[in-house]
Image: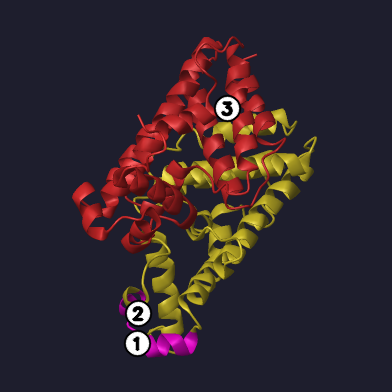
Chain colours: A yellow, B red
Amino acid sequence: MDTTARPSPRDRLLDAAADLFYRQGVGTGIEALCKAAGVSKRSMYQLFASKDDLLAASLERRAPGYAAALLPPPGDPRPPRARLLAVFERLEELSAAPGYRGCPYLAAQVELKDPGHPASIVAGRVKQALTEHFRSEAEAGGATDPDLLARRLTLLFDGAAARSGVQAETLSGLAVPTAAALLDAAGVH
Amino acid sequence: MDTTARPSPRDRLLDAAADLFYRQGVGTGIEALCKAAGVSKRSMYQLFASKDDLLAASLERRAPGYAAALLPPPGDPRPPRARLLAVFERLEELSAAPGYRGCPYLAAQVELKDPGHPASIVAGRVKQALTEHFRSEAEAGGATDPDLLARRLTLLFDGAAARSGVQAETLSGLAVPTAAALLDAAGVH
């Protein structure tokens, strides 16, 4: 197998879409996407029915990497509280990178303003999985109301990601202690 | 004075811009804005140098109403904790309205992805005023670290507004108790 082979047009389009939509927003045009991917418009429309479908597919493809970057690995031996705080530690770290623009899923939802858009549906599913992860850890940690704690942590996560992404806030030393205060209030010690 | 007079072209443009940018995003075109305002493109460009300037001016104009809708009136006799929670009560109420799409200032910042854009600068100033309001109330309420509490409350506010605005969350019974948990942790009783 020749691992130096150039990625397929489909993969190049998905990579270009993930990059450009994240940096420039969902208004990025087909021309710019095809140019960045080195793929003709004709080829693009053979692979994706529309720009909306390309956006949805690029968000879907990015989901496993997003989860891997944020969540502790399966079998992490730390107690639930530490595992929950670790997500906010990762957020503090990731948000300090120069190209950070916030959570790509929340950004897509905010920009599209249409919960029925295929990309909004993908984004909603990915964020729901984050909330579900919080809920499951909150339950393992003995939270008084795991569902409520998970929703609170998701509000904090999205607010922190958004404010940092627009360079209105620096999360270092802020996101983790705020999450800790919510864990304390929920009895997760 | 004839109070039934039609608003000026400038006011009609600012109203149309506030409405369309909020509902459809900053990608809304000049044509649609002029059409909604009943103003020619030629007239628009006599009043505003660019769409960016119109967007910035529409956000600026909306700022006093935004503050009045969210913050307790000057001289509100309740103690600082109740006044702080009142902001989140208002957010819970406002977010339940059918046309709610989140905080217009955070949305503009997320969509523009450019902290140097004139509209991002206006938005950042309006959000900074909210944080400053939180800080001043936190100080009046005896918070251990008023600045930190204000930043935490702003993360919560923005996360709550964003998630509700994309219809991923219902804030009723969620935003206020979460804010209360942060106030408790900061010693504001």
Can see residue A170?
yes
| Towards the viewer: A112 or A70 | A112
* Lateral position of residue A117 relative to residue B62, left or right: right
In the rendered image, residue B165, in percent from the top left (x then y), is placed at 57, 48
Q: Pointer 1 indicates a residue of which chain?
A: A
In the rendered image, residue A78, in percent from the top left (x then y), is placed at 67, 44
Tell me the quarter of the image containing the N terminus of chain B: top left
In the rendered image, residue B84, in percent from the top left (x then y), is placed at 58, 21
* Element on which disc 1 rests: loop
Q: Pointer 2 indicates a residue of which chain?
A: A
Q: Are marks 3 and 2 on the same chain?
A: no
Q: Residue at x 35, y 37 (%)?
A: B60
Dot label at residue B51: none
- Residue A182 figure quarter: top right
Q: Pointer 3 indicates a residue of which chain?
A: B
Residue at the disc numbered 3: B87
**Mark 2: amino acid:** Cys
* Lateral position of residue B2 relative to residue B173, left or right: left
Query: Would you say the magenta stretch is mainly helix, strand or loop?
Result: helix
**Mark 3: amino acid:** Val
Which region is colored magenta? Answer: A33-47
* Element on which disc 3 rests: helix
Pointers 1 and 2 in contact (C-beta within 8 Å): yes
* Element on which disc 2 rests: helix
Dot label at residue A34: 2
* Lateral position of residue B165 relative to residue A21, left or right: right
How far apart are labels 3 and 2 at the CA level?
46 Å
Q: Residue at x 42, y 85 (%)?
A: A44
- On screen, A60 above or below A172? below
Tell me the quarter of the image containing the C terminus of chain B: top right
